[in-house]
Image (cartoon, grey):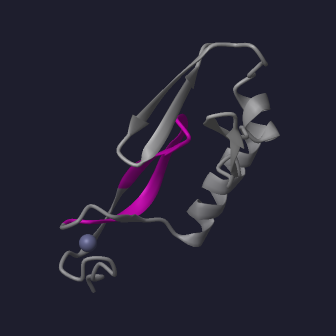
Amino acid sequence: MKMKCPICGKGTLKKGKIKEEMFGVYLGEFPAEICNNCNESFTDEKTTQAITNLAKEKGIWGLGKKTKITKAGNSLAVRIPKDIVNFLKLKEGKEAYIHPEANKIIIEAES
Ligand SMILES: [Zn+2]
């Protein structure tokens, strides 16, 4: 029996492989059911757990966090959480390039 895609409701799910990436770190290829209409992919519980474990091993699990925007003189400042500081090995006084991208702010720190 063919599984209908729960996202678009039009396509059917086919077995395939997806390349999983988190915060720019490549985690590997995993089996998934992929919609032939909208391309949405679904992994089973075991695969999802494996991806989670790999992300934890690589120290990237939970790196996405909420942060507060505070006032700093005439500008606004964003606090960078310690986990991200450690992951990117950021240091006070280093140069960074900041620019908007649609509704996001991209901060590129020199390595
Ligand atoms: Zn779909």
* Residue lying at 49% horizontally and 39% vertically, measured from the top left: 105
Whether residue 60 appears in this view of the structure is no
* Residue lying at 48% horizontally and 51% vertically, measured from the top left: 30
- Closest to the observer, 111 or 60: 111
Q: Position of residue 40 (x, y in %)?
A: 33, 64
Q: Position of residue 98 (x, y in %)?
A: 51, 26
The magenta segment is 17-36
Q: Is residue 22 magenta?
A: yes
Image position of 105 (left or right of 80): left
Residue at the farthest bottom position: 1
Quadrant in the picture for the N terminus: bottom left
* Residue lying at 59% horizontally and 62% vertically, measured from the top left: 48
Which quadrant of the view contains residue 58?
Answer: top right
Which quadrant of the view contains residue 23?
Answer: top right
State whether residue 98 is above or below residue 6: above
* Residue lying at 61% horizontally and 66% vertically, measured from the top left: 46
Residue at the farthest front position: 74
Q: Position of residue 2 (x, y in %)?
A: 26, 82
Image position of 97 (left or right of 80): left
Q: Is residue 61 magenta?
A: no
State whether residue 3 is above or below residue 63: below
Whether residue 20 appears in this view of the structure is yes
SS majority, magenta? strand
Quadrant in the picture for the C terminus: top right
Q: Quadrant of ligand 1?
A: bottom left
**Number of numbered discs visible in the structure rendering:** 0
